[in-house]
Image (cartoon, helix red, strand yellow):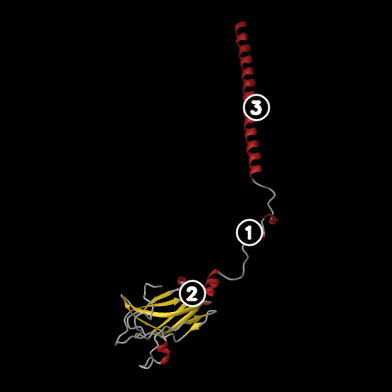
Amino acid sequence: MKMFKKIALISVVFFLLGSVIFLNLSFFYNYRENSKIKKVTQTTEQAIPTNISETSIKKTDIPEDDGMSFELRFSEEFTQKGSVSGRLGYPGENIPQLEVYFINQDSKNKNVTIITSYNQSEYFLQGLADGKYIAVAYVKDQPETSGAYTEAVLCGLTIECTDHSPVVFEIKDGNAAKNIDITDWYAPKGVLPEINSF
């Protein structure tokens, strides 16, 4: 009987010790987890500014809307440039394919070139920058054969018209230069610029 009481007493003591240890471990674990959560919360609060307002965005950071779309703005810029048009001619039954150069007299960077089709008798080109130009054409793959818009064209291109120097026409404020007829193919050598000279 005494032995049974001792065993029972020892069991109670171990149970109480185990309960105390379990409670201490549970408290320590909960305290540790709560500390981690508090630390993460503080870090997050520091990372997210709480003083953001509309006044913190500078007006200069936002491009002003001028009410014009990009497409319209681009189109307006393009149409503000000038155009040139006229007839094409050649001393023969057919007009060969031509390389037509509009040579700016002030800047090579503004030169414009078009390549015509076989038997094309008229042309129109839009997009010339302001400046003074001459119009010279070369037979494609035959650069030694050249024609131009010249004084002889203005004269009527008759046998009496002996001045074959190129006529300068001007593009200003997006105007249209019309009747720039490239039909004089009779200029003496050296009067018209060679294709590699500009």
Q: Secondary structure at mark 2?
A: loop
Q: Residues within 10 Å of mark 1 (few under 14, many from 20)?
A: few
Q: Give me the C-alpha separation between circle 1 and circle 3.
A: 54 Å
- The dot on residue 175 is none
* Amino acid type, callout 1: Asp
Residue 157 is situated, as x and y percent measured from the top left of the image, at 38, 91
Judge depth for marks 1 and 3 and give the one in front: 1
Q: Earlier in the sequence, mark 3 or mark 2?
A: 3
| Circle 2: residue type | Asp
**How many residues crowd around disc 2 within 10 Å: few (fewer than 14), some, or many (20 or more)?**
few
Does residue 142 appear to the left or right of 22 in the view shown?
left
Q: Which residue is mark 2?
A: 106
For marks 1 and 2 on the same chain, the one whose residue lies earlier in the sequence: 1
Q: Position of residue 89 (x, y in %)?
A: 36, 86
Q: Cβ–Cβ below 8 Å for labels 1 and 2?
A: no
Q: Which residue is under mark 3?
A: 27
Q: Quadrant of residue 198?
A: bottom left
Where is residue 192 drawn, in percent x and y? 38, 80
Q: Residues within 10 Å of mark 3 (few under 14, many from 20)?
A: few
182, above or below 24, in the image: below
